[in-house]
Image (cartoon, rainbow, N blue to C red):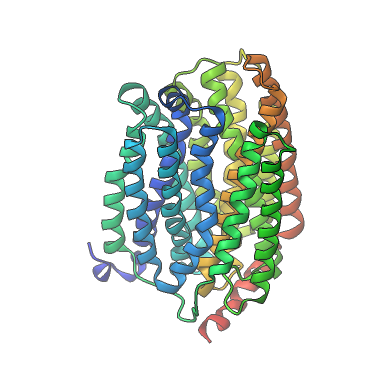
Amino acid sequence: MRLSIIPEAQRKWWTLAAVSFGLFMIMLDNTVVNVALPSIQRDLGADLSSLEWIVTGYALTFAALMLIGGKLADAYGRRLIFVIGIVIFTAASLACGLAGSEDMLIAARIVQGAGAALMNPATLSIIAATFPPRERGTAIGIWAGVSALALAIGPLVGGLLTEHVGWEWIFFVNIPVGILGIAASFLLIKESKDETHQRLDIPGLATSALGLFSLTYALIEANSYGWGSTRIVGAFAIAAIALAAFVVLERRQRAPMLDLTLFRNSTYTGANLVILLVALAMFGVFFFVSLYMQNILGYSAVQAGAAFLPMTILIILLAPIAGKASDRIGSRWLMTAGMTLLSIQLLYFSQLGPDAGFWNLLPGMLIGGAGMSLTMTPSAAAATRAVPVEKAGVGSAVLNAFRQVGGSVGIALMGAIVAAQAGGQRTVEAFMDGFQVSLIVAAVIAFAGAAVAAVLVRPHALEEHHAEAAVPEIAA
């Protein structure tokens, strides 16, 4: 089926289907890796720091290159960059499956992150360029529902493949999905780009990437080398200098990689901060909950995947509804309620012990599913409504970069807390002490996100006014 023969009224929905197909591959990869971590640890002899890098190496590259991915999509064509991203991601998946050591796997995961950084901002910018503001919440709700479907299927598929074939196949499964995604993109997505684009901001890319890498490296390796060691203090110093230089450069550049004027809109600022905080709170939790279920509760990979199903199925069901609701009533109170529910979920999990069963996990999973649905979709809808369409690529890239930065730092932060509390001991009690403290810290972070949403995100009437005011500017 070619785009030219699809009726105009249906074209945007077929475009959404094609974009969601590529997104499905990214999210599937996230979930299968978490479930397979104990098997990877045994086969490759990886320590906790290496396991964190297998996850955060991907997330960090994803975050560091997200802005350039959004810029490239706006400048050279959103479909073109989306397809290039799929090609890189698929090739890197093959390399991950063939990796014979933890270093090779981490390197391949870093390349995967580069492919995802090209794909992900293009998905939201294609949606923003295809759907009018009044329908974007609905479209993003479907987009988020597809993401959740991948999250739901991933743990089970990953568990089955890990137990019965080998963890390598959690990466090999991306190859046919990637090939189909490339074909669907050329058939169903109409090319679009920003005709006002000038040039790429290489200094901005270099300083942001250096700052983010140094920060995450320091957090992950601090317990290995010591928080006061020259290496770790130096990494924190480099991160501070590089990120400060990034802000200064972006304020002075004629064509900055990150247009800081976007943050003059309080809704856009609030949506990005909420995404940052939810990822900071939740990514590390997912990482350590997977280890908790398998290493402490004795779950198999399949059982651990199945334990997450109630949460992810609830996201599938509620994310589209939350998207429609954000179109009708706005995102502010949906996001506030969602972050509050996540804080409650984290506090609940912090009370679980080493003898918890599935029925003890279930209430927390259900609360978390509702919280994630009410947070993620309305946040994305609020952010895309708050930027002009011609800046949709970089606007959505910033949103996704905040999510990935929060995720990579969150895993490193929670890992640092667990390691510090354990004090080098490898006992169940030591792990549980660190696990519970990290969950309480994450709960405080989530509650801070609820406050940010309530204060910064505009009421719906003001969101709609901003979206309508941007139309003449786009046409000009």
Q: Nearer the viewer, residue 228 or 435?
A: 228
Which residue occupies the extreme bottom position in the image? Answer: 476
Q: Is residue 289 visible?
A: yes
The x and y percentages for residue 190 are 34, 69
Q: Residue at x 31, y 60 (%)?
A: 185
* Between 350 and 202, the one nearer to me in the picture: 202
The residue located at (62%, 38%) in the rendering is 220
The residue positioned 39% from the left and 58% from the top of the image is 16
Percent of width and height locating residue 228: 75, 38
Position above or below: 64 against 316: below
Residue 380 placement: quadrant: bottom right
Name the quadrant containing residue 362.
Answer: top right
Q: Is residue 379 visible?
A: no
> Which residue is painted at 33% across and 71% down in the image?
8
Q: Is residue 406 above or below residue 119?
A: above
Quadrant containing the N terminus is bottom left
Percent x, y for residue 384? 56, 64
On screen, 109 above or below 259? above
Q: Is residue 437 left or right of residue 123?
A: right
Report whether 158 appears left or right of 291.
left
For the residue pair 374 and 179, the one nearer the viewer reads as 179
